[in-house]
Image: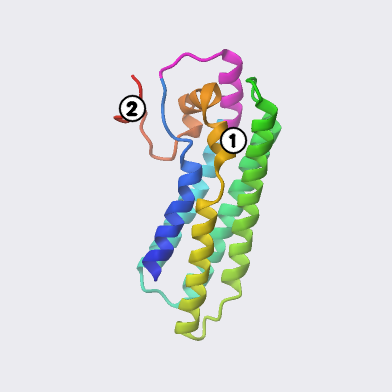
Amino acid sequence: MNKKFAAALSGGAVLVMALSGCSDDESDNEVDDWAKTVCDQVQPQLKKISDANASIQKQTADNSKPADVQRTDSQAFQQISDAYKAMGTAVDKAGAPPVEDGETTQKEAVKELNDSSAAYADLRKQVDGLDTSDQAKFADGLKGVADELSKISKSGDQALQKLQSGEVGKAMAKQPGCQKPGASNTASPDAKA
């Protein structure tokens, strides 16, 4: 059960970590400037999400006491919720990217980031409400949380994918702030040289 929870958590991080990558394509300076504005704000949030995921995975792997798992998960979900909210604010404050349908793309991305923030806040409430006095009940409750987490990670990430496509995606991929913590600037085998 704990492995399922950790796997679902890892899946949820994929949504944000999709910002990582690199590109050698030339881009318009305005788009680069927009991407830099967003990515400079995104980097600390990616680190918070990565740290929160690591704390949950460590606690899940430990065969820890239910109360310890609950406390760690609750704090991590709140941290992830806050990070998504901050990313939504960063994209909102940056304004529409200077590309075709930029305003629509921006609004959809902000809505999705805010929805993800709310979803993680709800997960925190679910975890806080679990009964830690009974290991079996706690494990069942945690399974429900893992199922919700899996749904969140699979939920429509089209707006973010759209934000990360085309000119804007290429510009974002070049920004160090939009690359996941620990990512190198080497091209992946499927990247265009």
Q: Residue at x 47, y 71 (%)?
A: 143
Circle 1 residues within 10 Å: few <14, some 14–19, many ≥20? some
**Residue 96 position (above or below residue 121):** above
One can see residue 14 in this view: yes
Residue 28 at what x, y percent from top left?
56, 13
- Dot 1 amino acid type: Gln
Way the structure is coloured: rainbow
Q: Nearer the viewer, mark 2 or mark 1?
A: 2
- Comparing 156 with 126, the one in front is 156
Is residue 34 highlighted in magenta? yes
Q: Residue at x 39, y 71 (%)?
A: 1
Q: Residue at x 45, y 46 (%)?
A: 14
Q: Which residue is identified by label 2?
A: 187
Residue 114 at what x, y percent from top left?
66, 47
- Comparing 175 with 171, the one in front is 171
Point out the stretch of residues depicted in magenta: 24-38
Q: Which mark is residue 41?
A: 1
Figure quadrant of residue 79: bottom right
Residue 188 at what x, y percent from top left?
32, 30
User: Would residue 16 appear left or right of 117 to someone viewing this image?
Assistant: left
- Comparing 148 with 117, the one in front is 148
Is residue 163 highlighted in magenta? no
Q: Residue at x 50, y 33 (%)?
A: 178
The answer to whether the residue labelled 2 contacts the one labelled 1, judged by CB atoms less than 8 Å apart, is no
Structural distance between the alpha carbons of marks 2 and 1: 23 Å
Which residue is farthest bottom? 134
Residue 8 at what x, y percent from top left?
44, 59
